[in-house]
Amino acid sequence: MAINTPPIAFGTDAPSSARGKQAGKARRPVPAPRPGLVTAAAAVVGVGLGATLALTITSETSSEFTGPGGVASFAGNLTGMAGSYLALVMVLLVSRIPFVEHVLGLDGLLRWHRRVAPWPISLLVAHAVLITIGYAQTAKTGTWHEVGTLLTRYPDMITAAVGLGLMCLAGVISIRAIRSRLRRETWWTVHLVMYLALAISFAHIIVLGPSFVGHPATQVVWSVAWAASAGLVLCYRVGLPVVRSIRHGLRVVEVRPEGPGVVSIVCSGRNLNRLAVSGGQFFCWRFLTRSHWWQAHPYSLSALPQPPYLRLTVKSVGDHSASLALLRPGTRVAVEGPYGTFTRHAQRHRRALLIAGGIGVTATRALLEDLPRAAQPVVLLRGTRQEDLVLREEVANLVRRRGGKLHELTGTREQQGLDEQSLPALVPDLLDRDIFVCGPEGFVADIVATARALGVPDEVIHYEAFAL
């Protein structure tokens, strides 16, 4: 494969005049997280849930409640409204609204998404069961007979049933034991079904919901809420990435080996000084080739942008990452992001400890570059072999410029483990530093547990775990 070498050497702090016209322009500052806005947004969501439940309760008359099937129907209406509302919340959590993502991070949003997800699915299943029982009791027919009646005689009921089935399917494949056996692309494709399920269920709620029948104002408010949720998803998951990708026009200019199974991909683009990104963040990258265009994968920047260049460094751990070593110069690239809170904005103390396991050095190296010159960082690079410590020369250079210390730990975990004895020995002032940990999930979990056992508060432990 022919490689065009760009006139750039990552690993320095100051831009070179050889980088072109963009290099002299100031980089767009990254906005600081605004947790107050997130707290206010959470309060609005809570008020909305309370209003939804209150509206459902007050729409029920005493005669309807006390009649045959009244209790079951009321419970079905209540669970249906609560489930539908929480389904919208679940969608909003993955719409990647910037001011929310800046505080919680994409991983945090996904964790909340997973916590919320069982509730709307369970409530909507309960809604279907209770409504069927209630209507059967009212009509004095059998439950199974009522199922047929609902599906054949009520408008939009079949689409609602299909939507519920799709939601349950998405929920089942999200169970950790099942998801771990699926390819990421398969899981992602099936998960798109959730949006389809919500869309085709909307008409059913508006037409048949007791809280909406005869209440045009409520129908309008609910319709606006659904439209706004869909609009936010389209804006931040589709529109913004498309605009950003067109604006910057990224193309691959070099694929550079860094170590065993590790390559750096250097991309060139326009107006990268306008791209607000912090060291430690990642993009979802979509390489526009025949075999890659339809899937986006998250990879951290392994250096701050040096206009007109961006760089990511990837370890071959699966089909997608392995295939990136074969990318050709000139390949167009679309990006979504940047995402992540593994940045200097999370830092509470003046000094920091950075710990990288394996390919976790990518986010760590970019974060290190973003720290102030007087940060005096301590950096621990962990690898099985010396050649696994990729980008070590760049890290050493950045540490030296910031008056810090670099420790290279190679060998097996038994030989070079980081436990409650070795970690304080390497970093005597551990409790006076923020700890940033990046690497494989098991490695990160072990370091975080060790730090907590040593008395390090959770608010100064920051981590990014790579699922390898």
Image (cartoon, rainbow, N blue to C red):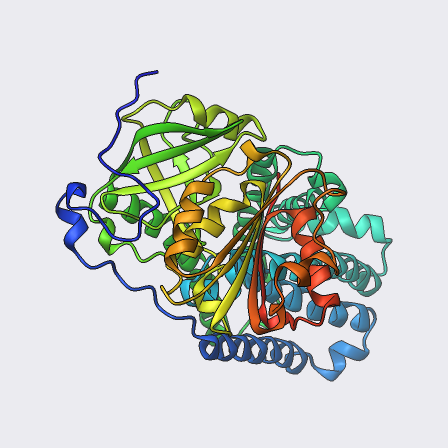
In the image, 17 versus 80, the foreground residue is 17
Q: Quadrant of residue 440?
A: top right
The answer to whether residue 197 is left or right of residue 38 is right
Q: Position of residue 87 (x, y in %)?
A: 60, 60
Image quadrant for the C terminus? top right
Q: Position of residue 108 (x, y in %)?
A: 57, 61
User: Which residue sits at x=83%, y=71%?
Assistant: 68
Q: Position of residue 260 (x, y in %)?
A: 53, 27
In the image, 265 versus 97, the foreground residue is 265
Q: Quadrant of residue 82?
A: bottom right
Q: Residue furthest top?
A: 1
User: Which residue sits at x=32%, y=29%?
Assistant: 254
User: Which residue sits at x=35%, y=56%?
Assistant: 277
The answer to whether residue 64 is left or right of residue 223 is right
Residue 222's place in the image compared with 161, above or below, is below
Q: Position of residue 225 (x, y in %)?
A: 47, 67
The answer to whether residue 426 is left or right of residue 339 is right
User: Which residue sits at x=35%, y=48%?
Assistant: 241
Image quadrant for the N terminus? top left
Q: Taking the image as drawn, is residue 302 in sight?
A: no
